[in-house]
Amino acid sequence: MSTTPTATVTFEGVSKTYADGTIAVDNLDLVCPAGKITVFVGPSGCGKTTSLRMINRMITPSAGRVLLADQDVSFLDAAALRRQMGYVIQSAGLFPHRTIEDNIGTVPVLLGSSRRQARQQAADLMARVGLDPSMARRYPYQLSGGQQQRVGVARALAADPPVLLMDEPFSAVDPMVRHDLQLELLRLQTEIGKTIVFVTHDIDEAVTLGDQIAVFQRGGHLTQVAGPETLLAEPADAFVDDFMGTDKGVKWLSFIAADDVPLHQEGVTPAGHPVAVDHERWQLVVDDEQRPTGWVAPGETSEQLRACRRTFRPDRDQIRAALDSALLSPAGLAVAVDSEDRVLGLASHADLATSIRAARTQR
Ligand SMILES: Nc1ncnc2c1ncn2[C@@H]1O[C@H](COP(=O)(O)OP(=O)(O)OP(=O)(O)O)[C@@H](O)[C@H]1O
């Protein structure tokens, strides 16, 4: 879809002091790389929104400059600049008296598209953000909060802007819907490759979405900027360490590929091979296609199968998924499968520990 090249957003020594003397942002130097998601995270009042709004000139810096590509935004026409920047906010900010398709088509019509073209484009965008086309003629109040946020994202993308600014866009929806929206945004980003600057105060959201995460502290100081894996494993100071939460180690496992986990064939039993009654280890019975059928406990027979609930894909998943597979398996063994769900082998807790140790050493 994207025809407009993406652009880097750069803060150079940017500060913002409000008229009452509040220092909202203090000497910010930061590069938000083109085509990547940069997340601003930090406690309430640390200057995230102020920083975001200086990008599209809703707020003017007191010092320093913000560059779009290599252009100082303060020299660009404000209206033209905002058309290059989709903007999504918490409450979606939809026009209540316009239908969904007309909400999405607002900017294209302003830019000269016919109403018919804009509606066609709205239909394409609705499909892209996972909205049923039958909702095109509804009004915002006839949609759930999560659906309204999807419309907000579709509307922000309508002018095909190189930059997307998102200010706590998913914080008003319940946790399940929020997680769906996060995954949907990641999927969409693989297609559109925009420069996205995303504000949140939720560290889990930041870790899920961010290619890089900028952690702000009260007083508008940028404390650390790094990829999520580095922030989890090497927080720069006690503030970041604390802010990243108590389960940093487990979160970190989401960034370690599971492709090095040692796999074993012992314990994998093809269907039709009777399991000896006196076997001492758990057996995973597989069907003719090598797909898992179920577990047989030591001393039991293959008539007493227990479900194999969770598997992992070494070619795609991270160690956290492998650990999940082991923890949820009655045998305490992780089951590795290929893209066709065929069993590749089993891994014990010790095997996973070996992989985790190797990843730590590599760091
Ligand atoms: N117009 C204003 N006038 C004076 N102070 C302001 C103004 N807007 C924001 N502030 C102050 O500037 C600081 C930074 O505010 P900002 O909204 O950027 O923080 P934030 O990190 O986005 O907070 P939150 O997570 O609560 O939205 C806060 O202390 C806030 O009270």
Image: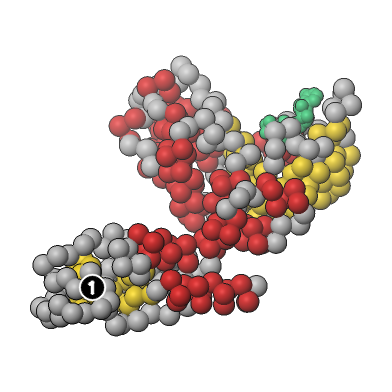
Q: Residue furthest top?
A: 97
Q: Which residue is painted at 21% across and 62% down in the image?
A: 306
* Residue receiving disc 1: 298
Is residue 112 left or right of 65 when viewed as pictured? left
| Residue 82 seen in this snapshot | yes
Q: Quadrant of the C terminus?
A: bottom right
Q: How is the image coloured?
A: secondary structure
- Residue 106: image location, x then y, percent: 51, 29
Q: Is residue 124 above or below residue 151?
A: below
**The one of 19 and 317 positioned closer to us in this rendering:** 317
- Residue 171: image location, x then y, percent: 54, 34
Ligand 1 shows up in the quarter that is top right
| Residue 25 seen in this snapshot | no
**The one of 4 and 322 positioned closer to us in this rendering:** 322
**The one of 205 and 191 positioned closer to us in this rendering:** 205
Q: Which residue is painted at 85% across and 41% down in the image?
A: 26
- Residue 196: image location, x then y, percent: 61, 47
Q: Which residue is painted at 76% across and 57% down in the image?
A: 236
Quick one: label 1, few (<14), some, or many (20+) residues within 10 Å?
some
Quarter of the view holding residue 107: top right
Quarter of the view holding residue 340: bottom left
- Residue 323: image location, x then y, percent: 43, 64
Q: Is residue 90 above or below residue 20?
A: below
Secondary structure of residue under mark 1: loop
For badge 1, the amino acid type reads Pro
Is residue 77 left or right of 186 when viewed as pictured? right
Q: Which residue is painted at 35% across and 81% down in the image?
A: 264
